[in-house]
Image: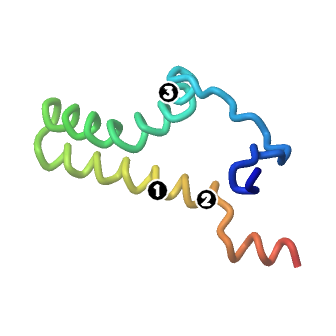
Amino acid sequence: MDSWLAPNTLDEPALESISIGAVIRRAGPRLVRDAFGPLAIFFAGWKLIGLTAGIGMAALFGVSVLAWSVYHTVSAFRQRSLVS
């Protein structure tokens, strides 16, 4: 039998089944925060106060989410300096 026809004899790990519910539970909060958060803040500010307030509130929310994620993420530079 040719070697290219032989079955794979390597000990490969079995692939885990991924359920849709697990993906939604893991990615859902981030999706709501990053995608729908600024939009919801904009519409709430626009309808309750005015257009300028809605834009400003959405921008402030977006910048605060960005600052939070940058603060809680270990950059490659910091990670390399921690290892050394």
What's the residue type where badge 3 is placed? Ile
Residue extending furthest toward the right: 84
Of marks 1 and 3, the one in the foreground = 3
Return the x and y of residue 42 as percentages of the image width and height. Answer: 22, 40
- Using the image, tell me which numbered label, if any, was put on residue 55: none
- Looking at the rendering, which quadrant does residue 75 occupy? bottom right
**74 lies left or right of 53:** right
The residue closer to the viewer here, 29 or 25, is: 25
**Which residue is labeled 3 in the image?**
24
Return the x and y of residue 69 as percentages of the image width and height. Answer: 55, 54
Q: Using the numbered discs, state the Cα–Cα distance from disc 1 to disc 3 in whole angstroms.
A: 22 Å
Of marks 2 and 3, the one in the foreground = 3
**50 lies left or right of 3:** left
Residue extending furthest toward the front: 1
**58 lies left or right of 71:** left
Return the x and y of residue 6 as percentages of the image width and height. Answer: 75, 47
What's the residue type where badge 1 is placed? Leu
Question: Dot 1 lies on which element?
Answer: helix
What's the residue type where badge 2 is placed? Tyr
- Using the image, tell me which numbered label, if any, was put on residue 66: 1
Residue sitting at x 88%, y 79% = 84
Whether label 1 touches label 2, CB < 8 Å: no
**Which residue is labeled 2 in the image?**
71
Vertical arrangement, residue 20 with respect to residue 77, above or below: above
Vertical arrangement, residue 38 with respect to residue 32, above or below: below
Question: Dot 2 lies on which element?
Answer: helix
Q: Using the numbered discs, state the Cα–Cα distance from disc 1 to disc 2 in whole angstroms.
A: 9 Å
* Of the image marks 1 and 2, the number of the one nearer the N terminus: 1
Residue sitting at x 28%, y 46% = 57
